Amino acid sequence: MEICMDFLSCLDHDTSMKILMCLEDPSDLVRASSVSRSWRDFVIANGLCKQLCLTMFPHLLRVDCVIEPSCVKEKASEVGCSKFVEWETLKREHEAYAFLAQGCLSFPFEECIKDAISASSTDNYPEESIRNTLQPGNRYWSSKGQRKAAVPETLVYKLVADICVITEINIQPFQAYFQYGSPIYSAESVRFRLGHPKCPMDDTLGEPLDDSADDKFIWTYSSSEFPMAQESCLQNFKLPEPVVCIGGILQIELLRRVQRQEMDGLFYICVAYVQVKGRPLSSAFGVEMLGPSGKFVLKAKSSAPPGLPEDASYHDVHLHGLVDSEQMVNLLEEEVPMEYD
C-alpha cells in the first residue's frame, strides 16, 4: 500500500514558500495549487501566482486592482464578512495572475498594429501619410525635409489590444527608385517607446495628424537605441526581453537623418512598412487607466456562469475563474488529476 504524505503540512511557512517559489513556470504553480485543497489555499493565501507574474513582467506592478466585470453586480450582494471579501479578492487575483502569466508566454504571436495615430511631420499629405506604413507595398511615409541631419522624427501607432506582450519591431526604410541613384531614406538609429493615452481614445481614430504626441501619452517603457542600416529590406529590431505594453500605444523614434534629397538639398526620413510582433491579450483581459499615475485596473474577462452548484467538483471551481475552462486546459497542456485532503 502506497503511503501519501502532504510534506507542506510538515514544514514551516518560510520553507514551504521557498520550495514553491522555485517554480518558474506559471503552469507548474497552477498544477501545484491543484494537488489538494490545502496546497491551493496556501498558494492563494500567499499570492504566489501574483508574485511570479510580477517577477516575470515588472510592468504589471502598476496594477491597482483586479476585477471581473461580469461578476461585479453579482458579488456586490455577497459583501458582508470582511474575511470572506478578502478571500474572494485573493482567489480572483490568483486566477487572473495565473492566466495572465501563462497568456504572456503562450498566446500566439500576431501582428500587433491596429492603426496609425500620428507622425511628427509629413511631407505631402495624404499621399505620403503614415497610414502607408501599415501594409507592405510601393507606398510610403515621408517626413518634411530638414537642413540639419540631427532633427528626429516620431511615428505613433495604436496596438490591437490594451495589453500586448511586444517582442520585436520590424521597419523597412523606403528606397526612391524614381530619384537619381535610387537613394534610401533611412534613419541612423531607432528607439521605441510603449505607453498609454493620458485621456481615453475613441476606437475610430480618424485621419492621422502631424503631431509629436508627447503631450498626449505617458510612456512607461523606452528601449535603448538600435542602429539602422541604410538598406531597403525589412530590418528586425528585437527587444532585449518581452515587454508588456499597458495601454496599447507604440512610438517609434527615428534618430538622425542620413540621406539628402538631391533636388532641394534637405535631409528626409522615409518608411515603407512597419510591423510589430507580439502576443495581444485582448480576448482575455482589458484595462482601465487611472489617470496620469500610470496605475490601472486589470479586467479579467470571465465567461464563467453566474454561479456554480454547491456540489460542483473542485476541478470545476478551480477552472471556472480562468476565462474559459477549455482555454485553461489547453494552456496547461495536460490534465492534472485532482486529490482531496
Image (cartoon, rainbow, N blue to C red):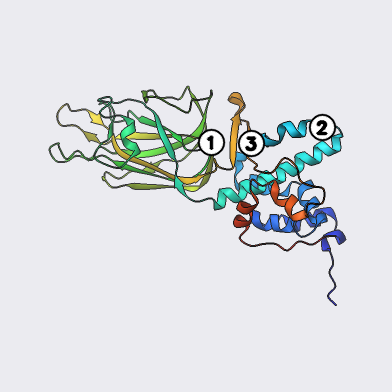
Residue 274 percent across, percent down from the top left: 36, 40
Q: Secondary structure at mark 1?
A: loop
Which image quadrant is residue 224 in? top left
Q: Quadrant of the C terminus?
A: bottom right
Of residues 234 and 261, which is closer to you in this image? 234
Is label 2 in contact with label 1 (beta carbons under 8 Å)? no
Which comes sooner in the sequence, label 2 or label 1? 2
Q: Which residue is mark 3?
A: 298
Q: Which residue is mark 2?
A: 79
Residue type at mark 2? Val
CA gap between label 2 and label 1 equals 30 Å
Residue type at mark 1? Asp
Residue type at mark 3? Leu
Residue 250 percent across, percent down from the top left: 45, 35
Any part of residue 67 in sight: no
Residue 333 percent across, percent down from the top left: 61, 60
Which comes sooner in the sequence, label 1 or label 3? 1
Q: Residues within 10 Å of mark 1 (few under 14, many from 20)?
A: many
Query: Residue 162, labelled with which disc?
Result: 1
Q: Is residue 303 above or below residue 254?
A: below
